[in-house]
Amino acid sequence: MSNRVRIWDLPTRIFHWALAAAVIGLFITAYTGGNAMVWHFRLGYTVLALLAFRIVWGLVGGRWSRFASFIYSPTSLSRYLRGQSHPDHLVGHNPLGAGSVFALLGFLAAQVATGLISDDEIAFAGPLTKFVSGATVSRATWYHKDVGQWVLAGLVALHVAAILFYLWRKKENLVRPMIVGDKRVHTGVQPSRDDALSRIAAAMVLGICGALVAWLVRLGG
């Protein structure tokens, strides 16, 4: 027996696709250069606000968006890799997907943080460079340009490859639930809350996160 259950609430879905669009935009503007770098910075600030929102929403959001629902022990990961899946692995993020999510969030945070204190020594510098030493700026710039972006590119490629693998080999569409929110799962699964009040709360959280990022950027003005 199975039924359709709300797994991904609307705020989580909007976050997911907004972050994907912003990351693509960051790569495009980084290699376009010139005046496009203005948008590179704006997109970086957007990603920072989205990441801050996701941290908060990972604590108070819908049931399957909370970090507590996809923090797995090494034993759970080992059993999953051996084909001994727990029923919850088929609902939200499975152990491999959870690892991918945390890796992407972590390296995106590192990329944005180093971008805030990077300097291309031509025309653009992060807004917080004046608060750190020249050596720190140099290291941050090196990581941001020569390490971080390639790590992220690799993680994104693995993420897409995993989605295609599940679609072609396991006949499981992981994209559709992230668009419509619902997923057909076994009976007895607790749905994520996704009503008007939770959506208003999410909008307020995002607004606060955006305001904090704007304040942080103005510190370097």
Image (cartoon, rainbow, N blue to C red):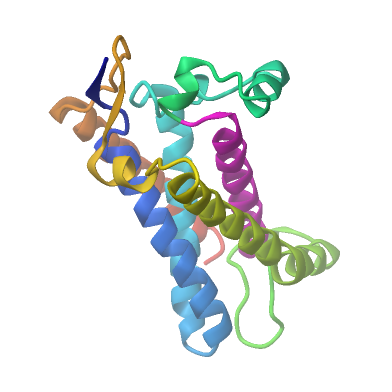
Image height of 52 relative to 77, above or below: below
Query: Which one is nearer the viewer's eye here, 11 or 39?
Result: 11
Segment tinted magenta in the rendering: 93-116
Q: x, y (%) of residue 198?
A: 23, 27
Q: Is residue 220 left or right of residue 88?
A: right
Instruction: Determine if residue 112 is in view.
Output: no
Q: x, y (%) of residue 212?
A: 43, 46
Count up the numbered dots: 0
Q: Residue at x 63, y 59 (%)?
A: 152
Image height of 28 relative to 114, above or below: below
Instruction: Determine if residue 125 is in view.
Output: yes
User: For residue 30, which quarter of the picture?
Assistant: bottom right
Q: Is residue 4 left or right of residue 124?
A: left
- The reply to whether the magenta stretch includes residue 31 is no
Q: Quadrant of the N terminus?
A: top left
Image height of 118 relative to 89, above or below: below
Image height of 170 relative to 185, above or below: below
User: For residue 63, which quarter of the picture?
Assistant: top left
Q: x, y (%) of residue 128?
A: 62, 61
Q: Residue at x 47, y 84 (%)?
A: 36
- Residue sitting at the far top: 188
Q: Residue at x 51, y 19 (%)?
A: 68
Query: Which one is nearer the viewer's eye here, 133 or 50?
Result: 50
Query: Which one is nearer the viewer's eye here, 162 or 219?
Result: 162
Q: x, y (%) of residue 192?
A: 29, 23
Q: Residue at x 67, y 88 (%)?
A: 122
